[in-house]
Structure formats: C-alpha cells, structure tokens
Image (spheres, helix red, strand yellow):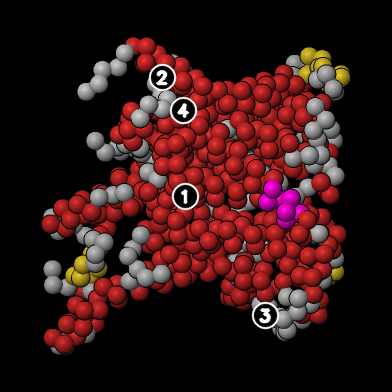
Amino acid sequence: MKNKVRTRVGRTVRFKTILQSDMTASNKSKLFLKIYGKALGHIPVYLALIALSVVFLVPFLYMIGHSFMTASDLLNPNIKWLPRSLNFNNYVYAFESMDYWYYLGKTILVVGISVFAQIMSSAFVAYGLARVKFKGSGVIFGIVLFMLIVPPQTIIVPSYILFSNAHLVDSYIPIVLPCFFAMGLNGGMIIFVFRQFFKGMPAELENAAMIDGTGIFGAYFRVIFPNVKPAILITGILSMVWQWNNSFEPSIYIEDSSKGLLNIQLRELQQSVSNVMQGVDFNQGINMAGTLLTILPIVIIFLAVQGRFMKSMAESGLAN
Amino acid sequence: MKRRKPSLEKRRSRSGYIFVLPWVIGFLIFQLYPFIQSFILSFGELTDLTGLKTRWIGFDNYIAIFRDDVDFVPAFIETIWQTLLYTPFIIVISLVIALLLNQKIKGRGLFRVIFFLPVLLGSGTVMAQLGEAANIMQIPPTIEQYVNYYFSTDIASFINSILSEIVRMFWKTGVQIIIFLGGLQSISDSYYEAAKVDNANSWDMLWKITLPMLSPMIYLNVIYTLIDSFRSEDNAIAGLIVNRVFDNSDFTYGSAMGWLYFLVSFTVVILATVIFRRYVYYEK
C-alpha cells in the first residue's frame, strides 16, 4: 500500500514505476511523492484532456485565423494559421452582404418564440405524463418516443403540401406553429427531459401547493413549473441551438432566401462569394467571417450560462 | 393521512387529459396525418397535387428505387454503415472524455465548455458548409503532412482518412459526454470506499462499479446516438430524399424513399433497444 497514493475521487494511482526507476530513493523523495503525488497523478489526465481539446479547438482557431486573411494571405503557402495583419475587411463585407442587424433581429425573434413555445407546451404535456395517473398516458409517452425515430425526411412531403395549401410557405409559420403543440424540432426529446425532472420531483412540493386550495393547474404554473429551472435551462439551450442551426425545414419551406433567417443568409453569402481557383478559395476569409458572425450570438449566450447549464445537466438524472 | 375521495381521483385523471391535449392536437395534425399520408403517397402516382390525389400503383415506387435509382442503394448503405460504425466509437470516446472530466482537477470547467462547443454548431448549415467549403472538420494539416512524409501514398491516405473519421466522431460527442458526466456524478462515493477497503484497484473499480452503475446512461446514449445519426440532415440518404422530392418534384417517389428509410432506421433502433435493455443494471 505504501507505493499507492489515493486521490479524493477514489482513484488509486500507482507510483511503483517511478519508484523503481530510482531505487536509491531517499525518504525525502518519498515524502515529495506523498505531498505532490496527487497533483502528479493528474498530469496524464491533463495531457489527455489537452490533446483532446486540440481536436475540438483547431477548427475554431482555423476559422478565427482565416476570417482575418486577405486573398494574398490565402495564396501565400507560408501562411497557415496567422494572418499577416489584422484586417477587418472580411467582417465588414460579410456584415453588409448578410444585412446582419436585420437578420439577426429576425432570427432572435423567430428562434425566441419557438424556444419559448416549445418549452411551455412540452413541460405542460410532460407534467401530465409524469405525475398524473390517467388511462393512456403510457401509450402517449410510447408514441412520443416512437415519433423520435421517424426521420423528418419521412413526413416532410405531406407536411410541405399541407402548409403549401394553407399558403404558409415562404414564412416561418410551418416551423414555429408546431412548437406551440409540444412538437417542433426534436420535440420528443424536450418532453423526455421534462418528464425525467418531474418524475424526480418530491411529492411534498406538489401536495403543499395543492393544499393551498389552488387546483392542479394553479399549482403547476405557480409552484411546479418554476421549480424545474434546471430542466428549463437545459431544454432552452438545446432548443435554441437546434433552432438556430436548423436548416433542413427552412431549406424546404423557404423558397425566397430573403425571407430566411441568418443561416440562410450565410448560405447565400457563401454561394455568392465562393471563388475557387487552383484549389484556393480566394474569398474564404469572407466565408469564415460570416460563419463566425452567425454563430457568435449563441456562443455568447452559451458562455454566459454555461456554469449553471453544466450543473443542471449533472443533476438531471436523465437516465434514471 | 388524508384520504382521497374517488371524485377527486377522477377529476385529477381528467386533468391529465387536459395536460396532454396540446400534444394530442399537434400529433394528429403535424405528425400522424403526414405520417399516414406519406405512406399512402408512397404507393401511388400523383394525379392532382393540391388535393393530394393519387392513383394506386402498388409497389412500383419501391421497385423503381431499387431497380432504377443508381444513387439510392449506395447512399442507403453508406448511411446505415456509418451509423453502425460511428455509434460504438462515439460512445467509447464520450465515456473516456467524461471519465477524464470527472477527475477533480483544476480547470475542468473550461474543458467541459470546450467539449460542448461542437454542439453549438455541430449541425446545420454552418457545419455542413464549413465541412464542405473549408474542410476544417479535418485533422490538423501538420499531422497530415507528417503522415504523408513517413508513409507511402496508399497507407498515408488510409491513415489520413481514418484520422479524419475519428475527428468527425469527436464532433458528435457533446451531448453524450454531458449525459455520462451526470451519471458519473450520481454514483455514490460509498461504493468506491467499500471497494478500496477490499484492495480493489482503479481498473477493477471501473469495470465492477462505474460501468454497471453507468449502464442506464450507456443505454440512453446508444439510443440517442442512433436516433441523432438517423435524423441528421447531413447524412447521405437525407440529402438524396430532399433532392428527389424538391428538386425533381417527385413527391410519391420521395415518400417511398422516406418510408424505406424510416423502416430501416426503426428496425435498427428497436434491435438496439432489445439488445441493450438486457444489460442495463438498475440500482434497487
């Protein structure tokens, strides 16, 4: 047991090999190990994490680096990551060409309404499924899960014809409207997450709210729904990210690209400026700047709430 | 203890129906109707677009998919194969990352954010365009150069293609890592304390405590990964269906493709459910 150092998390780290390589190890170095062993044991963990982070960060760094590159930078074989100078022309071009403020506002509005509607309706339905006993609740939850397996491509044709006959094509109504009925993008997953949270909620909370004399709906809105903030945060972030990046439904319902959201503008920008010669895209810098502008808002929102988000995910007990 | 009157019980169960009412309405209009309609469409030939009137032609659409369409079978096989191949790797990679992140080290908050970044843009236009236009979901160019330098052309391109596949897998692990982390943190320390008294090493503890306790999350993650992959808009078959339906305006043919795709992905998910359910360990 002497050559083992225990860490707080219960991992046992062996230092046998280190000790063997230094057979004349004095008491001093043993003491050193005892004191710093825990930190030393973390070195492989750090190395592994840093190596893995590189895989995730490289595309971002590449994107940021290239967003500042001029055409001559892109052509220069000596320039791989860092542009020679910090020039914001790509951003200015992308900004104007995408009509950024207008489409950003529109995107925030559409995504905001969808996320709000999806969360309110899904939580409401999930509460009924999790805490109210009634005939058929099991069947309904089964259908919710079943519909998750149905790929959107399978039902897109009749959906398109449905909305097309209602003259709602070229608007975001086909995408926003289902959100009010606990549907929408990955709606089943949001019901699933809320159901897990409601199931894990102590019954006392519910009873206390009911004893006050309010009916079950009053209790739900006043006490129960405000008490699942972690679930609201998790589903809110996921729903926002999905809706923000969603391009499948818009690519079908939106025929006039000027009626699309920010990601449609990005696609238009990329198609209009793409100028590939001899394997080099001269306007790649503009593409990268436009891409960064498109994702920047959700990255900022995520970074602002990430601490609470990670904590909520950890407490979620999603698989119990 | 308060005794509940049956009328209250009844009223409560009636309120259950009100809770699920929004979903029922949405399901009938936005899911069930299109689902059945596309099934009917897949056996017909469109005679009137606005009324969705079709003429019954039996399995002709399905036969044409396999007999005449040169793109369908390869795209189909690619999608299924990729899903089956990626899923186990994604599970293992996200489990390893979650185990690393669960160590009590400084700065793990930062690492968690980094590993979640792909979720923020891991789908949709942004990533699809980036993957296509800039090829940035690839291995770092320096590594590629080293591989090209040390190996012959065939082997180098093989290694590079494997490496870039691995990178693509990494980019699909965000949600799974977080689900695993939540699971790891819910395992009580007392199990590990008890194991340490019995002189267990960390390898034993991983196999005898951590993995069995995590099995519900592994199960959930397998199903999530499969569904996520089948629903993904950037897989080969999804692109093909959209192309056939909306670029060629062939609604009935596209519906048949959609239904074939549904049947196969459904079978895979159900099989996975049946297989993995048996290995899930639930704490009593």
Q: Is residue A128 visible?
A: yes
**Above-or-below relation of B211 to A100:** above
Q: Nearer the viewer, mark 4 or mark 2?
A: 4
Q: Which residues are magenta?
A: A103-109
Q: Quadrant of residue B266?
A: top right
Are labels 1 and 3 on one chain?
no
Please tell me which residue lies in front, B55 or A263: A263
Where residue B153 sits: x, y (%)? 65, 68
Q: Element type at marker 2?
A: helix
Q: Earlier in the sequence, mark 1 or mark 2?
A: 2
**Does any portion of residue B168 appear in the rendered image?**
no
| Residue, disc 4 | A217
Mark 3 chain: A
The residue indicated by pointer 3 is A82
Give neighbour class at mark 1: few <14, some 14-19, many 20+ (Cα, 10 Å). Answer: many
Labels 2 and 3 share a subunit? no
Asked if the residue under mark 4 is in contact with the one under mark 1, i.e. CB atoms within 8 Å, the reply is no
Q: Secondary structure beneath disc 4?
A: helix
Residue extending furthest toward the front? A213
Q: Is residue A121 left or right of residue A251?
A: left
Q: Are marks 3 and 4 in contact (CB under 8 Å)?
A: no
Q: In the rendered view, does B228 fall on the left or right side of A290? A: left
Q: Are marks 4 and 2 in contact (CB under 8 Å)?
A: no
Confirm or deny contact between disc 1 and disc 2 (CB under 8 A).
no
Please say whether residue A104 is one of the residues in the magenta stretch.
yes
The residue that appears at 17% across and 73% down in the rendered structure is A3
Give residue A241's position: percent from left, percent from top: 60, 50
